[in-house]
Image: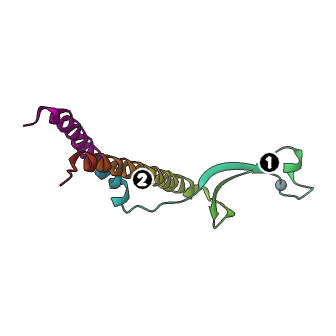
Amino acid sequence: MDPHDRPRREKLSRLRRELLELQEQFGKTLEVALAGTPLVKGSVYEIARRCGNPQCRCTRGQLHRNIVVTWSDQGRHRMRSLPPERVREIRQKSKEYARFRRARAEVSRIHDRMVAVLDRIQELRREIP
Ligand SMILES: [Zn+2]
């Protein structure tokens, strides 16, 4: 065995370990996508506003409070007010959506890193015939 080959083999071994770790992270991250629960794109929050009726109590500071969900759809800002019995459910589904999006970004990051590691491995394994 060529003694000068040792640093190369050590680098390769480190890269192989990193690749296996990335593979494991990749699998864990994808688990988020395997669940079948519905996702709601949007933010849930409370708004307080005046209704426009000049006789209403809201003109004296008692604003109308409403829980709404807002989202964007093809560049358009959308809003829907939520009945109290649906607030909890929509909040949960909105959290799931955010979780899904984080996982998607993470998958992209891991994938990029994997390709970089593969390029290094290829470089180190390449032999000129
Ligand atoms: Zn009012």
Task: Say which residue appears at 57% left-offset and 54% top-offset.
Answer: 87
Q: Nearer the viewer, residue 46 or 72?
A: 72
Looking at the image, which is closer to me, 3 or 47? 3
- Residue 116: x percent and y percent? 35, 48
Amino acid found under the numbered disc labelled 1:
Leu
Q: Nearer the viewer, mark 1 or mark 2?
A: 2
Query: Magenta stretch mostly in which secondary structure?
Result: helix
Q: Is residue 28 visible?
A: no
Sequence-wise first label, 1 or 2: 1
Residue 81 at what x, y percent from top left?
Answer: 66, 60
Relative to 8, is 93 on the left or the right? right
- Name which residue lies at 41% across and 48% down: 109
Q: Which residue extends farthest right?
A: 54
Report how many numbered discs are placed on residues in the image. Answer: 2
Residue that carries the numbered disc 2 in the rendered image: 108
Residue 104 falls in which quadrant of the image?
bottom left
Q: Which residues are magenta?
A: 1-23
Q: Is mark 1 within 8 Å of ligand 1?
A: yes
Amino acid, disc 2? Ser
Residue 85 position within the rendered picture, expressed as x and y whole percent measured from the top left: 56, 57
Question: On the rendered structure, is 111 left or right of 123?
Answer: right
Numbered label attached to residue 63:
1
Quarter of the image where one finds residue 20: top left
Residue lying furthest bottom in this view? 74
Quarter placement of the N terminus: top left
Circle 1 sits in a helix, a strand or a loop, which is it? loop
Q: Secondary structure at mark 2?
A: helix
Q: Within 10 Å of the Cα at label 2, are there few (<14), some (14-19), or many (20+) other Cα atoms?
A: few
Image quadrant occupied by the C terminus: bottom left
Outermost residue toward the front?
Answer: 129
Q: Residue at x 81, y 45 (%)?
A: 62
Percent x, y for residue 108? 42, 53
